[in-house]
Amino acid sequence: MTQSPPAFPIAEDVLARFRSTAPQPGMVMPDYQGFSTCNVAQLIWRNFGLPNRCPEVLAPVLDRPYRRIILLIMDALGWNQLHDGMSDSPAVQRLAEKARMVPLTVTFPSTTTVALTAIYTGLTPVEHTITGHMMYLREVGAVVDVLRFSPAGDPRREVYAERGVDVHQLFPMYTVFEPMEKQGLDTLSITRGIFTNTALGWLHHVGADVSGYLIGADMFVHLRHAIQNRKKDGLIAVYYDVVDMLSHEYGPFSDMVRCAVDQTFHTLEKQILNRLTAEERADTLLLITADHGQCDVLPDEAILLSEQPRLRELLMLPPTGQGRAAYLYANQGEAPALGEELHRFDDRLWLLGRDEALKSGVFGPPELSNRIRHRIGDYVGVTRGATQVMGAEVIRDRLAPKGHHGSLGESEMIVPLIALPLDAW
């Protein structure tokens, strides 16, 4: 008797699973061994018969073997943001009717340097070892802006590369593309042109041909041409960041973001789905996901070092990590005093000591935690609600309500995985 394939996960059941393990009200723990963006690469490897650790809960996404997968990564398209805009977007509705969709959790912190790296590598933060946007790295003796690969506060890009620092030695990892390339499969990574020759790009795109774009218009045309002209089996990955940019500026549930989501799915439909021939659609799976979502932050809820002289005295460094998930380094011998001072903000901050954070699994398997022990401070400040932790240079009057991410809030942590066989369109 032939065993029927496992059923596709029901979104409501998966959301209930996330909420059942909430470490604090309104928070979501990364589901690294199940419904996680870290496992998208594992799912792709599984499709092509490569070694993988894809969890069985995601196996139903592969209803059959595909010769080609297109992975569209939409920066900051959270589960809540997608559904917020769906009612006003016929294009999103049409895609949702023909596709299957399941929620995934992202990494902690829910920020691009960490979470996008997880998608491109299939690794948890303790494995790829990037722990935030701003990181204190003992190897260079400084706080590093990982996105720019430059000293914190330096507006230039790739300063450390110019000084001869090898980003691959700081963050040893492999990409989703490398094992595919070794097996003779086709690999292409399409990203914004300004990111192609950057340190983070050097980490993310190893093993792939890289194509840069200027804006969404040429991105979608580049993608269509790649589908039409690259005949070998393999993977095309596309990164698109417009939702993130607008969410930071206007808020993740603004009309501007709703418009961007609608435009993106409308253009995907018009330029890709409706223009491919049946032959070009055949045995091709489109996967759409995101590196994180966003939430609204409020100036009145911010914890500002400019207003906290005692905190400034106790800290060895300005807060690292990111505003929604801060790493706090105490002066020598003053970790207990720093913890006591930070507990004054328990209404806005879930405070974890370093060992507690590493043992919790929030960064990935605890047995690997020594890899990042010195990269997360003495304390990890996980913000609640609409709070941020900001350095001494920030004044409250200059803050504005905008979108942000990095913490464990549902709107930051839960993103969609949309699966559409193109021949079903």
Image: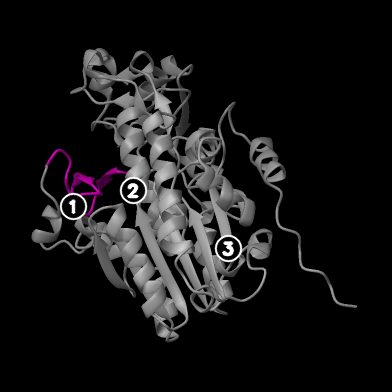
Query: Camera-side residue: 339 or 238?
Result: 238
The local crowd at label 3, few if under 14, some if 14 to 19, many if 20 or more residues have their Cα within 10 Å, is some
In this rendering, position of residue 151 left or right of residue 175: left
Which quadrant, please, contains the N terminus? bottom right
Query: Camera-side residue: 186 or 49?
Result: 186
> Which amino acid type is shown beneath numbered disc 1?
Val
**Compared to 229, does 81 lie above or below?**
above
Question: Which labelled disc corresponds to residue 241?
Answer: 2
Count of numbered tags:
3
**Compared to 370, does 190 lie above or below?**
below
- Dot 3 falls on a residue whose secondary structure is loop
Query: For the point 69% across and 36% down, which residue is it?
Result: 20
Instruction: Report the residue marked by disc 3.
Output: 425
Q: Earlier in the sequence, mark 1 or mark 3?
A: 1
The local crowd at label 1, few if under 14, some if 14 to 19, many if 20 or more residues have their Cα within 10 Å, is few
Instruction: Report the residue marked by disc 1.
Output: 140
Query: For the point 31% across and 53% down, which residue is it?
Result: 216
Q: Position of residue 166 (x, y in %)?
A: 20, 64
Which quadrant, please, contains the C terminus? bottom right
- Dot 2 falls on a residue whose secondary structure is loop
Mark 1 to mark 3 CA distance (whole Å): 51 Å
> Which amino acid type is shown beneath numbered disc 3?
Trp
Q: Are marks 3 and 2 in contact (CB under 8 Å)?
A: no
In this rendering, position of residue 43 left or right of residue 206: right
Q: Is residue 139 magenta?
A: yes
> From the viewer's perspective, is the residue at label 1 or at label 3 nearer?
3
Q: Position of residue 127 (x, y in %)?
A: 43, 59
Question: Which labelled disc corresponds to residue 238?
Answer: none
Please report the bounds of the magenta region as a residue range.
131-154
**Res. 329 in view:** no
Mark 3 to mark 2 CA distance (whole Å): 25 Å
